[in-house]
Image (tube, helix red, strand yellow):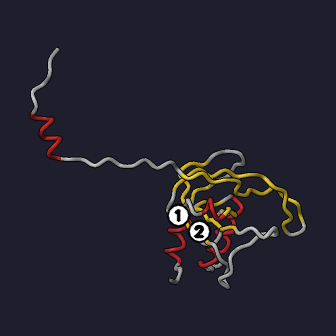
Amino acid sequence: MEITKEIAERIINSRALVDQAGVPFKKVEVTYVGYTDSNGDNFVDDNGDEFAIVSFNAVTPYQLEKSVEDFIAEDYESAVNHNVSMRMPVKQASLVAKGCPGTLLLRDAEVEVEGEMITALFAKSFTPAVAVDSKKVSLADLLAKASAPAVTA
């Protein structure tokens, strides 16, 4: 799918701005869970453990700035590719899916950008929202209850 100017604007506008470390940001949605690289090989860390990449519908101020720069340069594909993501153990990643809401927590880290050390925000953890089973309704039961005589004490 081609990312047009309108689509890029809609995607960027839908992102949650997460701008503080140590603050739980609620209702952040998962946009992607990937287990393999572009060659189809599983992601594996230096210890040989498999992991997944989980992306969120959220941006840090730095990522938002990069999105705006790319949007102005009319590189809409790149403009929508700046978002918060994190490595997650495969077992944990299997519990989240695209669209899954939850709480995202960020951490500060010192990184070098263009030869200068800066403090940047990175995803630290994601906790999926606790789901509750919905209840079925029965119109017949509700009507019977509504027509039953009231009990008085």
User: Is residue 56 shown left or right of residue 122?
Assistant: left
How many numbered markers are drawn?
2
Q: Is residue 149 above or below residue 89?
A: above
Q: Earlier in the sequence, mark 1 or mark 2?
A: 2
Q: Which residue is mark 1?
A: 97
For disc 2, the neighbor class at 10 Å (few under 14, some 14 to 19, many from 20) is: many
- List the single residue furthest toward the top: 153
What's the distance in space between the residues labelled 1 and 2, CA to CA? 7 Å
| Amino acid type indicated by mark 2 | Val
Horizontally, is 90 left or right of 147 in the view?
right
Camera-side residue of 95 and 83: 95
Give the percent coordinates (x, y) of residue 50.
71, 69
Residue located at (89% from left, 63% from top): 116
Residue 33 is marked as 2
Whether residue 72 can be seen here = no
Q: Quadrant of residue 115?
A: bottom right
At label 1, counting other C-alpha atoms closer than 10 Å, the crowd grade (few under 14, some 14-19, many 20 or more) is some
**136 with respect to 48 (left or right):** left
- The residue shown at (84%, 61%) is 111
Disc 2 element: strand
Residue at the spot 70% in from the left edge and 64% down from the top edge = 87
Horizontal and vertical percent for residue 51?
69, 67
Three-letter code, disc 1: Ala
Snapshot quadrant of residue 66: bottom right
Callout 1–callout 2 Cβ contact below 8 Å: yes
Instruction: Name the foreground residue: 47 vs 28.
Output: 47
